Image (cartoon, coloured by chain):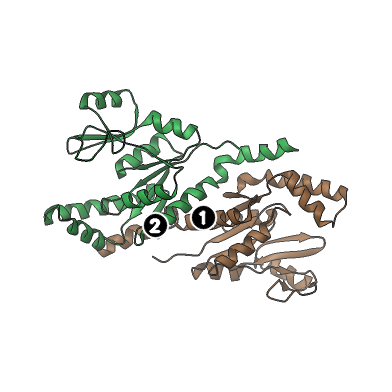
Chain colours: A brown, B green
Amino acid sequence: MKRKGLLIVVSGPSGAGKGTICKDFLELNKDVLISISTTTRKPREGEQEGISYHFTTKDHFESLVRENALLEYVHVFDNYYGTPKDWVLSRLEEGKDVLLEIEIVGAMKVKEKYSDAVLVFVLPPSIKELKNRIVNRGTENLDQIEKRMERALEEIRTIEKYDYFILNDNLAKAVNDLEAIVAAEKSKVSRYSMEIVKSYEEEK
Amino acid sequence: MKRKGLLIVVSGPSGAGKGTICKDFLELNKDVLISISTTTRKPREGEQEGISYHFTTKDHFESLVRENALLEYVHVFDNYYGTPKDWVLSRLEEGKDVLLEIEIVGAMKVKEKYSDAVLVFVLPPSIKELKNRIVNRGTENLDQIEKRMERALEEIRTIEKYDYFILNDNLAKAVNDLEAIVAAEKSKVSRYSMEIVKSYEEEK
């Protein structure tokens, strides 16, 4: 039975811990590929081309947008970030599973363009805990933190557009939940029903 | 967040191995309850009331059917087999997960009456392997075996009405798949989306 790969989109409010969950998940599931985003942001120290990001110019990025070469993109703080469409779709055709760790807005766009995508929302244990994490980072003032909390709540309100949620109150449990979601999606009859029946009929 | 229990229905052709998968699954997941069927069949040696089955009379069973007290029932070789509705629905309301291991026809009826049920189809590795297993049991003649194979293929053709399939070519993997399905179903946004949003809004 030939299987197309799964497109797994992990998203959620900043600070909910999606990055750590994805990192641990990928270490345990070496066969799942991560999509590297393209960005116009300047590389920070230690960041490598093709590993952290594909770095490019604003002009080139805008040409990618015009050519519909991105599965999704966002414009944040004067920088673009996007997901290369061809690379992702080719890996899926080959039967490879691909993980995207992206922002809420991007996740919605991916679902529009590729309805088979599996959308996973990472929830913080509580708004209070989310606030603690941001406060402890020490990179933002109180006003910015309040705005971020408002935004997190706004984002949680979009959860009904997602397929699954993961409550990140325990990292190992959260990674396990993501693994279960991927395994269960591969057991869904709706993805393969005709091929299943055919394979048994042909055998007869 | 209050959660209703999951109703997990495991079904599939006779000989595909659903019984063994369910037994191993229940041993690893002590919090999941198994529903005991009611039957008019006479107890076999070693079978105990309330453990193997609830044994009852034909008259009483037919009154249960009239009172709509069964989630599903079938009539096989002059015996009735059914699933007590009240017991199952009460456990689900309490938040307990309930497993049913039943025939294809019964599974369809459960889905009609309780659309939240999760239907899992256990597939044999191949028709050939299914035949080997039945032949090795040594309880049926060649003609009966051929009929059983025809029926198995007919049953596999109903798979599109199921939510998930499990290919039983490796018992441990099959049990794992069932565990992943149960975990993923509990992570589905569609089951809880309003409660999730509310719980974060109330906290603010």
Name the quarter where the N terminus of chain B is drawn. top right
A38, above or below B84, in the image: below
- Residue on which disc 2 sits: B174
Mark 2–mark 1 distance (CA, rounded to whole Å): 13 Å
Pinpoint residue A79: horizontal percent, then vertical percent: 79, 64
Q: Residues within 10 Å of mark 1 (few under 14, many from 20)?
A: many
Q: Pick whichever, A104 or A56, lies toward us.
A: A104
Indicate the position of residue B110 as horizontal and vertical percent values: 37, 37
| Residue B197 versus residue B87 in the image, above or below | below
Chain ID, mark 1: A
Q: Amino acid at mark 2?
A: Ala
The quarter of the displayed image where residue A63 is located: bottom right
Camera sees residue A88:
yes
Q: Secondary structure at mark 2?
A: helix
Which residue is identified by label 1? A180
Residue sticking out furthest to the front: B46
Q: Label 2 crowding class (10 Å Cα cut-off): few <14, some 14-19, many 20+?
A: many
Q: Is residue B173 left or right of residue A121?
A: left
Q: Nearer the viewer, residue A7 or B133?
A: B133
In screen coordinates, is A204 left or right of A91? left
Q: Amino acid at mark 1?
A: Ala
Looking at the image, residue B165 sits to the left or right of residue B76; the answer is right
Q: Residue at x 66, y 40 (%)?
A: B197
Disc 2 with disc 1 on a shared chain: no
Is B197 drawn above or below residue A137 in the view shown?
Answer: above
- State the residue at coordinates (16%, 55%): B145
For the C terminus of chain B, give its image quadrant: top right
